[in-house]
Image (cartoon, rainbow, N blue to C red):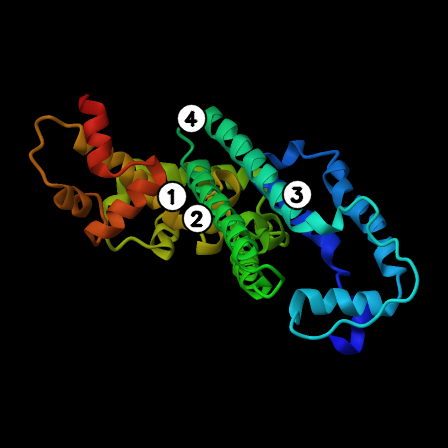
Amino acid sequence: MFQVIYLVDVTEPLNFLIGPFFYLYIFSKVDESRIQRIYYHFLPAIGYLLYSILFHLQPIELKYNSYLEQYHPELSFVEVIGNTFEDPLLIKNFVNELTILSIAIYVIFSVIKLYKAQRKISSNSDKKKSYRILWIDIGLMTSILFIIVFVKSFYPHDLGDYIIIVAICIFIYSISFKVIRDSVFFRNDLSKNKYSKSVLDDETKQRILSQITAVMDEKYYLNPSQSLPDLAKKIKTSPNYVSQVINEKLNLTYLELINEYRIEEAKTMILDPELNETMEGIAYSVGFNSKSTFHSAFKRITGKTPSEFKNSKNN
């Protein structure tokens, strides 16, 4: 750092982007279609950037002393010749407190936004799952906020900043992993591009869909050894065409379709008062090869475990 001492504190304005970026991330995951006029969230960062120009116009000796004060307080300061005018409003002296306040405000905004959005949804299991993950994100950001408060309380200088940096990096990496994993590039939402060269017209797709539905109505899904090629053989078409129709017309994969039919069958069996069968027995009866797979699919589709579903209907 001594080699580029003129860059000391040059990244301070970025402190005021942590909160806004996190809030906009939550906002976009909750309601991407309504996000607009976001520029005012960046005004504090822009304002502090302009204000910090006064500091960067100061002599190199002042910047050197500033660096020593924060990271090497045991060393001797150098003399600064002339009057300085680097922080007339004393904002720079309280940049840590203002950073904490900024993050805290945007965490509160995020909690309010997600809470209101969660109250509006019904039994959409996909949204419930994504909202649960967002609550974890808010918990992580709150943890980072407490880490910042802890570090700034016990380290009078900036000697503990590496702890904050590590925490923020872990959070950024986790968010990046989730964004990449949920990217349209890795999902079936690319079906339009995937099947752009397909020769199937709408009439043929509808006919294949009707055939698939007819086979499913015969409870084909109860067969534990069912497969996409086997289904295609039954309706006398290619597996690629079956997969395309299920993707485009139902917005599902083949396995998701099979599991939805199986879970509907399982729900009927669970609510049958005359059926004396265990959950494991029901799982095998509807075509699942294991109890754990059955429970996972049931929870993903209905938002409840089989036992919770049964209890909710009996109450």
Spatial CA distance of label 4 from label 3 is 29 Å
Secondary structure under tag 2 reads loop
Numbered tag placed on residue 122 in the rendering: 4
Asked if labels 2 and 1 touch by Cβ distance under 8 angstroms, the answer is yes
Q: Name which of mark 2 and mark 3 comes first in the sequence.
A: 3
Question: Which residue is identified by label 3?
Answer: 20
Spatial CA distance of label 2 from label 3 is 37 Å
Say if 267 sits above or below 22 in the image: above
Question: Which residue is identified by label 2?
Answer: 253
The extreme bottom residue here reads 3
Image x and y of residue 124, in percent: 43, 32
Q: Which amino acid, mark 4?
A: Ser
Question: Which residue is identified by label 1?
Answer: 257
Specify the quadrant that holds the C terminus: top left
Q: Name which of mark 4 and mark 3 comes first in the sequence.
A: 3
Q: Which amino acid, mark 3?
A: Pro
Q: Name which of mark 4 and mark 1 comes first in the sequence.
A: 4
Which numbered disc, 1 or 3, marks the residue closer to the eye? 3
Say if 68 sits above or below 275 in the image: below
